Image (spheres, rainbow, N blue to C red):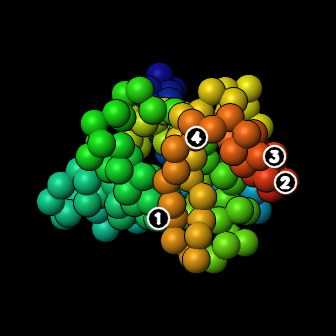
Amino acid sequence: MYLCIRIFVPTLIKYKQIILFVSGIALIFIFFLLPQNKKWLNEKLFAYWNDFQKQKNQPGVEKRKIARYGTSYTYSKRIALFFEKKGNKKEALVLLPSQKYFENNGIKYAVPEPAVFYYYTGLKTTWANSEMAREATWLVRVENKNMVIDSAKERKVLLDTIAAYQKFKYPL
């Protein structure tokens, strides 16, 4: 009888570990079959993996940023380049209209929020719905489907522009 217990108990423990392992894998599989979890898996995890596969062979950081962030990044960099050429990038505060404003004027530009714009470019920006909008020294507008950067030295022009931009909804 002792011999029977000695052989049977270790075998039972091995089967128990296998059963727990298989049931754990099955629970994870079932978890990701639920609609919300499946959506998260596809939109977040697999999307990052697919981006990584596309971008891992690109040579530079700048090219990867362009591939990852698209027009939001490239338009933001173009605006910042204007101030780099003028040499006043650190002092400038730029008033940006919302994405809806650009869409209504024929430009597909997903305007990043000011913190993200600063992350992209190092340039300080503000939206018309912010208290800082009245302190803006420059503004971006659209003329004939082209982005134009104007000085905001005249107070009346700045206030009129803020009022016009506030008609378009900002995401935050």
Task: Using the image as rendered, state which of residue 94 and residue 11 is in the foreground.
Answer: 94
Q: Are marks 4 and 3 in contact (CB under 8 Å)?
A: no
Q: CA distance from mark 4 to mark 1?
A: 25 Å
Q: CA distance from mark 1 to mark 2?
A: 24 Å
Residue appearing at x 69%, y 54% in the figure: 98
Q: Earlier in the sequence, mark 1 or mark 3?
A: 1
Q: Earlier in the sequence, mark 2 or mark 4?
A: 4
Q: CA distance from mark 2 to mark 3?
A: 7 Å
Residue appearing at x 58%, y 77% in the figure: 144
Check the image and report above or below for 55 versus 123.
below
In the picture of the structure, the residue carrying the numbered disc 4 is 152
Q: Which mark is residue 71?
A: 1
Q: Are marks 2 and 3 in contact (CB under 8 Å)?
A: yes
Badge 1 amino acid: Thr
Write down the quadrant of residue 102 in the picture.
bottom right
| SS type, badge 4 | loop
Q: Residues within 10 Å of mark 3 (few under 14, many from 20)?
A: few
Q: CA distance from mark 1 to mark 3?
A: 26 Å
| SS type, badge 2 | loop
In the picture of the structure, the residue carrying the numbered disc 2 is 167
The residue furthest top is 2
Q: Residues within 10 Å of mark 2 (few under 14, many from 20)?
A: some
